[in-house]
Image (cartoon, rainbow, N blue to C red):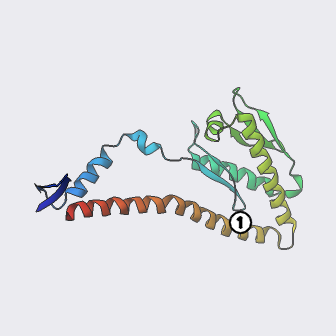
Amino acid sequence: MIERIAAVRGSKITIIAVRLGAWWPLWLLLMLTTSMPPSTALAQDERVTVRLDGRALFRVGPTTDADATTRAQRVERRLATLLENPQAIARARVERGTLEEERIVTVAGVPVVTVSLLDAEDNLTTPAALAALWAQRIDTALAEGRGRRLSPGGRFAAEVQSAVTAAFGRLGESALTVIPRSLAALLVLGLFWFIASV
């Protein structure tokens, strides 16, 4: 297939004939995606939202022993366990971790989440300030969760509501990630299609 590319220089039009196969845009895309260094793929936001009753509290990143999804699930399980006995919930406290830069948010003596230096850097603050913020959000969420569980309908209504809220919240987060990537892919394909048809 012969493609023509026109370039305008002053009043001259130079036509360059290039002999290329019909599949060259796909080959070029394949070469670009396979030649990307692994660090480029890891540059994506790896943080995951921690939710209680479907409501977003904060986002956690990976640690040395767990990825972000596993870490968020652990925090959510601990918070759900605390809500199984709503009368025994105490205020969240911030304690110093084993490392100088770590802080641990505890509720009723149960360690809920460890705030690392990396978490603080991701949120552009210090570990102590971030731990205080997360403790405040945990307090608010636990108080609201306790209120929902002690209201008429109790735990069943709270569980149904949290499942629906979490589903829509995660759908929204997925849409915010997938839609821009899809539009970018369509733009690249459209650009290659345009170049191929010129």
Residue 65 lies in what quarter of the image?
A: top right
Residue type at the position of mark 1: Ser
Residue 21 lies in what quarter of the image?
A: bottom left
Relative side of 61 to 130, left or right: left
Residue for point 21% across, 62% down:
196
Residue that badge 1 annotates: 162
Residue 121 lies in what quarter of the image?
A: top right
Q: Where does residue 14 sit, x and y in percent of width and height?
A: 13, 54
Q: In the rendered image of this protein, does residue 36 appear above or below residue 12?
A: above
Residue for point 34% across, 43% down:
36
Relative side of 48 to 76, left or right: left
Q: Where does residue 129 sit, x and y in percent of width and height?
A: 75, 37
Q: From the viewer's side, name the closer residue of 14 and 84.
A: 14
Q: In the rendered image of this protein, does residue 143 appear above or below residue 149?
A: above
How many numbered callouts? 1
| Residue density around tag 1, few if under 14, some if 14–19, many if 20 or more, within 10 Å | some
Quadrant for the N terminus in the image: bottom left
Q: Where does residue 68 sit, x and y in percent of width and height?
A: 58, 46
Residue at the limit of the structure toward the bottom, as seen here: 153
Residue for point 71% across, 70% down:
160
Q: Where does residue 151 sit, x and y in percent of width and height?
A: 87, 69
Relative side of 24 to 124, left or right: left
Q: In the rendered image of this protein, does residue 117 appear above or below residue 2?
A: above
Residue for point 79% across, 67% down:
155
Q: In the rendered image of this protein, does residue 83 appear above or below residue 100?
A: below
Quadrant for the C terminus in the image: bottom left
